[in-house]
Image: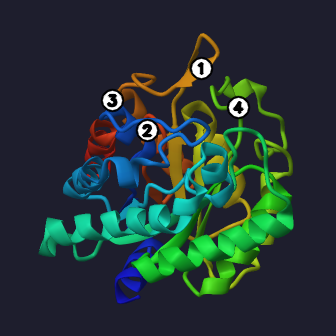
Amino acid sequence: MDRYRSLIERARAGERILIDGGTGSECLLRGAPELANGWSGGAALSDPDIVRQVHLDYIALGADLIASNTFATGRNVLEDAGVADDFEVYNRRAVELAVEARSLAGTPADHVVVAGGISNWSFSGDRPSLDLLHDNTVEQARIMRDAGADLISLEMMVDLPRMTCTLDAASTVGLPIWVGLTIGPEEGHGVDELGEVIELREGGAISEAVEIARAYDLVDAFCLMHSDVRLTERGVAAIRAHWDGPLGAYAHAAEVEGGRVTFEDAITPAAYAAYEPAWRAAGATMVGGCCGIGPAHVEAVASALGR
């Protein structure tokens, strides 16, 4: 907790915080196999060396926070992928790999915090009831806490009911929580297509999401995450209008080819880093990247931050 307390105090004081880039997409890019209906969720067991090295690469670039490769290890996702029997080991091992990377990086990385990433997404579209989602998330958060996570990061919250359910569940384990909100379609669109009221991807005003989440004592930060780079400035500004604490811009870039979403080569590192001044002006105090944003992009962002 001392490590986490130091980070959040720096963030609250206005120091620029560097978050890591995409982990799941980077693991797949490096050769980890994709699970049917489970994306990169299997990498902690199929290719632990790849996962650990991705974390190490972000740490070497100066990341203050690295997130476990657990976006796709919710119980419902692993059930759809046919590997739910390994729910505990997937989540535990993924957090352990991030902790191991920090240890391997040595004393210069002692300050790096490990976030246990929890999502309520479904790749099959078959989502559990809210009661079942709550129970599954409590179990997942406990596994992450016991494996060494310093905080819980709620990833890709796209609607109000599931966000609230996931937040209720994560709050039971006593770790600090960061809430990642997502707007716009996966492939993105022009900023002119956003309405006056910024909505979560699947419904509910982002302002209402912030008001709900900020009422939880354990919520220390928000991120506009897994949202197209073109929409991130507006999304960050919408959060900032209702939140005066640490706020992250954690964007992605995607393309659709033959009906399949791809992240590889969707944006150059220089083009990604060029958004940073606008995100900062909109209120972002922390910057990283989500799917399709790899070490080269984070290196460019670090340079923009003066690292």
Rendered residue at 60%/57% (across/down): 84
Using the image, determine if residue 143 lies above or below residue 231.
below
Disc 3/disc 2 C-alpha distance (Å): 19 Å
Res. 215 visible in picture: yes
The three-letter amino acid code for the residue at tag 3 is Ala
Residue on which disc 2 sits: 25
Residue on which disc 3 sits: 270
Rendered residue at 42%/77% (across/down): 147
Residue on which disc 4 sits: 185
Mark 1 and mark 2 lie on one chain; the one further toward the N terminus is 2
| Label 4 with label 3: CB-CB less than 8 Å | no
| Label 3 CA crowd tier, 10 Å (few <14, some 14–19, many 20+) | some
The three-letter amino acid code for the residue at tag 1 is Arg
User: Closest to the observer: 66 or 44?
Assistant: 44
Q: Secondary structure at mark 1?
A: strand
Res. 214 visible in picture: no
Q: Nearer the viewer, mark 3 or mark 2?
A: 2
Q: Quadrant of the C terminus?
A: bottom left
Write down the quadrant of residue 65 in the picture.
bottom left
Disc 2/disc 4 C-alpha distance (Å): 17 Å
The three-letter amino acid code for the residue at tag 4 is Pro
Q: Nearer the viewer, mark 1 or mark 4?
A: 1
Please tell me the numbered disc located at residue 260: 1
Q: Nearer the viewer, mark 3 or mark 1?
A: 1
| Label 3 with label 2: CB-CB less than 8 Å | no
Q: Secondary structure at mark 2?
A: helix
Write down the quadrant of residue 208 in the picture.
bottom right
| Label 1 CA crowd tier, 10 Å (few <14, some 14–19, many 20+) | few
User: Closest to the observer: 278 or 141?
Assistant: 141
Residue 86 x, y percent position in the rendering: 51, 61
The three-letter amino acid code for the residue at tag 2 is Ser
Q: Nearer the viewer, mark 2 or mark 4?
A: 2
